[in-house]
């Protein structure tokens, strides 16, 4: 089981965003939260007054990137324009804590296998 971490200036807003994109809740304290991605990897977010970097060092994948784009835009999140690529389509979303996270399309044909 792996883990990735990210700082946030808005723990509650980041928590809601992560729930909106489907991450399972694990733990929340006054200055930290833990969510679980598919496969058991944990995303740990720490409350900070200021971000050192705004661009997340990891990407997320969506089974239906167009639906994810419309959902996040409809919920009021700041999203970039969709970029169509040879392997992946992608967009960037800015979550309430100030992080810019790239969302890629998945190239897995049968999602029931993962």
Image (cartoon, helix red, strand yellow):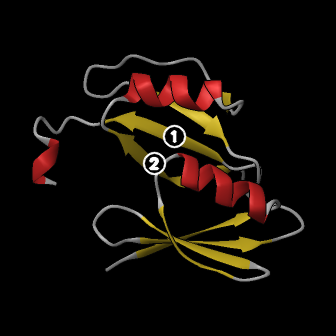
Give the crowd class for mark 1: few <14, some 14-19, many >=20 residues within 10 Å.
some
Residue beneath disc 1: 102
Q: Position of residue 46 (x, y in %)?
A: 71, 74
Q: Position of residue 97 (x, y in %)?
A: 76, 54
- Residue under the point 90% across and 67% down: 49
Give the crowd class for mark 2: few <14, some 14-19, many >=20 residues within 10 Å.
few
Side (left or right) of 49 relative to 75? right
Name the quadrant containing residue 72: top right
In the picture, the quarter occupied by the N terminus is bottom left
One can see residue 75 in this view: yes
Residue beneath disc 2: 59
**Above or below, comparing residue 47 to residue 74 in the picture:** below
- Residue under the point 56% across and 54% down: 19
Q: Decide: marks 1, 2 in contact (CB < 8 A)?
A: yes
Q: Count all numbered tags in the image, as a single digit.
A: 2
As rendered, which of 7 and 14 lies closer to the eye? Answer: 14
Q: Report helix, strand or loop for mark 2.
A: strand
Q: Position of residue 71 (x, y in %)?
A: 54, 29
In the picture, the quarter occupied by the C terminus is bottom left
As rendered, which of 45 and 74 lies closer to the eye? Answer: 74
Q: Earlier in the sequence, mark 1 or mark 2?
A: 2
Q: Report helix, strand or loop for mark 1.
A: strand
- Residue under the point 76% across and 62% down: 12
C-alpha distance separating marks 1 and 2:
5 Å
């Amino acid at each position: 089981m792996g883990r990735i971490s990210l700082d946030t200036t808005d723990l509650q807003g980041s928590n809601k965003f992560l729930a909106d994109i489907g991450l399972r809740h694990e733990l929340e304290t006054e200055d930290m939260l833990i969510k679980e991605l598919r496969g058991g990897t944990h995303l740990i977010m720490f409350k900070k007054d200021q971000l050192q970097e705004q661009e997340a060092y990891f990407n997320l994948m969506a089974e239906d990137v167009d639906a994810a784009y419309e959902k996040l835009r409809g919920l009021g999140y700041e999203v970039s324009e969709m970029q169509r690529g040879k392997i992946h389509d992608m967009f960037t979303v800015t979550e309430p804590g100030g992080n810019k996270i790239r969302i890629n399309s998945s190239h897995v044909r049968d999602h029931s296998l993962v």
